[in-house]
Image (spheres, rainbow, N blue to C red):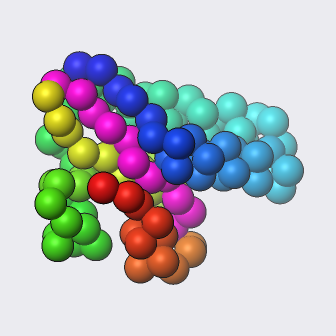
């Protein structure tokens, strides 16, 4: 399977990675990047591994989400053997506001 990151997800990922680097240092950022990369590999092997995200249950697409290190959430959907990562956000933020930013 192929993974495509939507711009919204790229932006969220970069913000979180930069925040981690600023607050906790380069080693923590590297660990975070490694965790995300490992989840990408797992998703390619098992695209339905994550549960369906209830924040998106009224949407036309079936969105799934996976927690990265209990602080970050990666939201994705499947379409034609492609995994689209739609959002990546800090779980300490308001989830409803975050979900509204995901465009179908």
Near-viewer residue (2 or 72): 2
- Spot the residue most to the top: 1
What residue appears at the point 23 percent right and 55 percent down from the top-left corner? 63
Residue 13 visible in the current orientation: yes
- Spot the residue most to the front: 104
Q: Which residues are magenta?
A: 81-91
Residue 89 in magenta?
yes
Residue 71 visible in the current orientation: no
Residue 95 location, x and y as percent?
44, 75
What residue appears at the point 15 percent right and 41 percent down from the top-left corner? 48
Near-viewer residue (44 or 104): 104
Residue 7 location, x and y as percent?
53, 42
Q: Quadrant of the C terminus?
A: bottom left
Per the picture, the main secondary structure of the magenta-coloured stretch is strand
Residue 3 location, x and y as percent?
35, 27
Q: Quadrant of the N terminus?
A: top left
Q: Is residue 48 above or below residue 82?
A: below
Q: Is residue 12 left or right of residue 91?
A: right
Q: Is residue 75 left or right of residue 37?
A: left
- Residue 38: quadrant of the picture: top left
Q: Is residue 31 above or below residue 52?
A: above
Near-viewer residue (63 or 46): 63
Residue 52 location, x and y as percent?
18, 59
Number of numbered markers: 0
Residue 22 in magenta?
no
What residue appears at the point 32 percent right and 38 percent down from the top-left corner? 84
């Amino acid at each position: 399977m192929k993974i495509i990151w939507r711009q919204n997800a790229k932006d969220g990922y970069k913000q979180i990675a930069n925040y981690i680097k600023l607050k906790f240092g380069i080693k923590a950022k590297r660990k975070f990047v490694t965790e995300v990369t490992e989840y990408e590999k797992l998703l390619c092997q098992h695209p339905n591994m994550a549960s369906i995200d209830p924040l998106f249950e009224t949407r036309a697409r079936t969105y799934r989400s996976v927690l990265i290190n209990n602080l970050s959430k990666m939201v994705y959907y499947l379409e034609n053997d492609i995994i689209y990562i739609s959002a990546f956000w800090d779980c300490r933020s308001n989830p409803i506001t975050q979900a509204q930013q995901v465009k179908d």
